[in-house]
Image (cartoon, coloured by chain):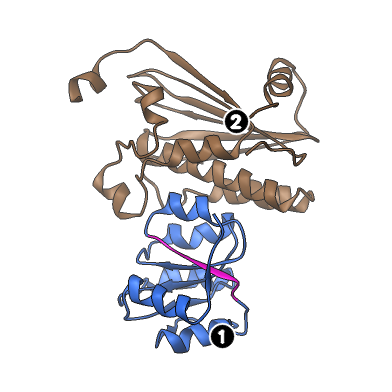
Amino acid sequence: MYLKDIVNILEGEALIPEANLDVEVPCAFASDLISDILMCTKEPTLLLTGLTNNQVIRLADMIDIVGIIFVRGKRPLDEIIEMARERNLPLICTKLTMYRSSGLLYNAGLRSCKI
Amino acid sequence: MQDFAAAKSEAADYWHFQPGREECSRRHLASLHEADVTLESLIPEKDFNTAGRGSAEVKNLLKRLGVDPEILRRVAVAAYEAEINVAAHSKGGIMTSSIYSDLIHIVFRDKGPGIADIAQAMVPGFSTADDMVRELGFGAGLGLPNIQKNVDALHIHSAAGASTLLEFLIHFDTNHGQ
């Protein structure tokens, strides 16, 4: 599955227009806890979260995050979007909840990350 | 519970080694080898704009040195968790990373107020984080367990009312017993 497919499935909006969405996404993880995200991401992973602070972007410096989905209409501040732009990290917003987003992506064939 | 946490405690040491890593780790800690590269990074109290920069800097340097990606991930996760701990729970501190040909040794020293009961702090889910820290997605009580899981040797020295020293070693060969 590609990031552009994920934007369609989640009726999402890409926050960085120039970001490359032709990126293959092997798996996903959903959490609002930074330690959980750090512990569970051992391969290139799509992150679904309700956190919009700068530390979510900084996570991409530590672990291999292919993109971040902000669920339930959450939208980071411009300075946070800028941090992601510097890292070539695609950001996508969706109005759907974390549960619904995860269910739709799982049904479409996107597997859970290995933990 | 509050009284217990506030009570004065004796300075305590906590050690943990991954299976098969104790001897080589202790040998390294007892030796006086000079590091090939040393990096220092300040960690200001409750500054979540800069917290994590030190860990990212160390990870990028190791990447340039050609360290295995799985080792890089473990160094980054352990260093980041420790850096966040200093920012979230202490009055600020300093992170010193010493890089050798075969391992990295990172030491975090803070200005207190110390850990009253280290064994309790190691229990997954135990947390003393305040609301501000929790709102940012931290404070799950998984920081120290997450550090321990990713390092070859972990040492914590602390007491209530004193500073805390946390140091760990990660060897660059890939025989981690996780």
Chain assignment, label 2:
B
Give the residue at x 36% y 36%: B89
Does the stretch in magenta take in B57?
no
Q: Is residue A74 above or below residue B27?
A: below
Within 10 angstroms of label 2, few (less than 14), some, or many (20 or more) residues? many
The quadrant of the image that shows the C terminus of chain A is: bottom right
Q: Does residue B103 appear in the picture of this structure?
A: yes
Chain A drawing hue: blue
Residue B66 — which label?
none
- Location of residue A78 in the rendering, given as x and y in whole percent from the top left corner: 40, 74
Nearest the eye: B25 or B88: B25
Quadrant for residue B18, please give it.
top right
Could you say whether the residue bearing mark 2 is in a helix, strand or loop?
strand
Nearer the observer: mark 1 or 2; the answer is: 2
x and y, in percent, of residue A8 in the image: 46, 89
Residue receiving disc 1 = A18
Name the amino acid, label 2: Phe
- The residue that disc 2 covers is B168
Q: Could you say where residue A30 lies in the image, as x and y percent from the top left?
A: 42, 64
Residue at figure coordinates x 37%, y 71% from the top left = A76
* Extent of the magenta region: A25-31
Q: What is the quadrant of the N terminus of chain A in the image? A: bottom right
B117 left or right of A56? Answer: left
Q: Is the residue under label 2 in contact with that under label 1 (CB below 8 Å)?
A: no
